[in-house]
Image (cartoon, grey):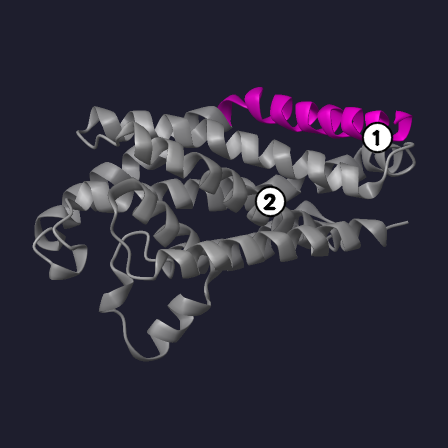
Amino acid sequence: MTDMKNELMGVYAVWLREFKRFYRDRGSLLGSIARPLMWFLIIGGGMGASMSASSALAGADYFAFIAPGIIGMTILFTSLFQGVSVIWDREFGFLKEMLVAPVSRTTIVIGKALGGATASLFQCVIIVAVAYAIGVHFSAAALLAMLPLIIIISVGFTSMGLTIASFMDTMEGFNVIMNFIVMPMFLLSGALFPISATGGIMSTAVYLDPMTYGVEALRYAAIGVSSIDPMLSLSVVFAFTALMAVVATVSFSRRK
């Protein structure tokens, strides 16, 4: 019983530290407002008139169509770059203190993953508010359906970021790898366009992107539109998150 209490306290301590790190970063908070607003106004405003007439949108307004995609984008960016905390902790010696603490390394991974999920959820709330301000109104049922999806997808991509960071020694190397991964995953996910309109090699790449299934699941929960069977999307999201959590735990367990 005491060991379980220590593990739970360890999860809470790591989670609280990660969330405070995010909350105190004013640049991240401002970016969480500016970035979705920019995508809504520039992409939504520029492509909305032409895309709204597309039959692939199944009659949905283009702003409503891309809103779940922008939520997915925020989850992807925030969660993957949560791995930066591992680099910082290693450089300042705090990671060594965490690894020798009387808690399992699984506890550390869970705490960091939940911290990333909380930061993503916080930013997604801001995006929903921005969407509401420009006329995209989600029902209460849609918001409740998106909530667990946001958390699950965030945990998966935070775990992925932690895994990559565990093999990186410098911030520069981590940023190079992240930039190489993030933009292709976002652009191929169907966040800004119906994936049913793709074909050939592009279509294959789209369906190999795990973010595609996250975006499609969020879009179905938000507006009831999806190019992929919702059960398949949910299955891939759960499988991806479980796999990344295990890989992140193993990566941390092997660190000395």
Q: Tell me the residue at 51%/21% (across/down).
A: 26
Query: For the view shown, which residue lies furthest in the bottom direction?
Result: 200
Residue placed under numbered mark 2 in the picture: 158
Distance, label 1 to label 2, CA atoms, is 24 Å
| Quadrant of the rendering where the N terminus is positioned | top right
Label 1 element class: helix
Q: Amino acid at mark 2?
A: Thr
Q: Using the rendered image of the protein, determine whether residue 8 is visible from the camera's viewpoint.
A: yes
Q: Is residue 195 left or right of residue 238?
A: left
Most common SS among magenta residues? helix
Label 2 element class: helix
Residue 6 belongs to the span the image colors magenta: yes
Residue 236 image point, x, y percent: 49, 59
Report the mark closest to the observer, 1 or 2.
1
In the rendered image, the vertical position of residue 90 relative to residue 206, given as above or below: above
Within the image, what quadrant is residue 44 found in? Answer: top left
Residue 113 image point, x, y percent: 64, 39
Q: Tell me the residue at 48%/31% (across/down).
A: 121
Q: Earlier in the sequence, mark 1 or mark 2?
A: 1
Q: Nearer the viewer, residue 24 or 79?
A: 79
Q: Is residue 144 left or right of residue 96?
A: left
The range drawn in magenta is 1-27
Q: Which mark is residue 4?
A: 1
Q: Nearer the viewer, residue 247 or 242?
A: 242
Q: Residues within 10 Å of mark 1 (few under 14, many from 20)?
A: few
- Marks 2 and 1: in contact by CB < 8 Å? no
Q: Tell me the residue at 24%/26% (across/down).
A: 132
Q: Using the rendered image of the protein, determine whether residue 212 is visible from the camera's viewpoint.
A: no
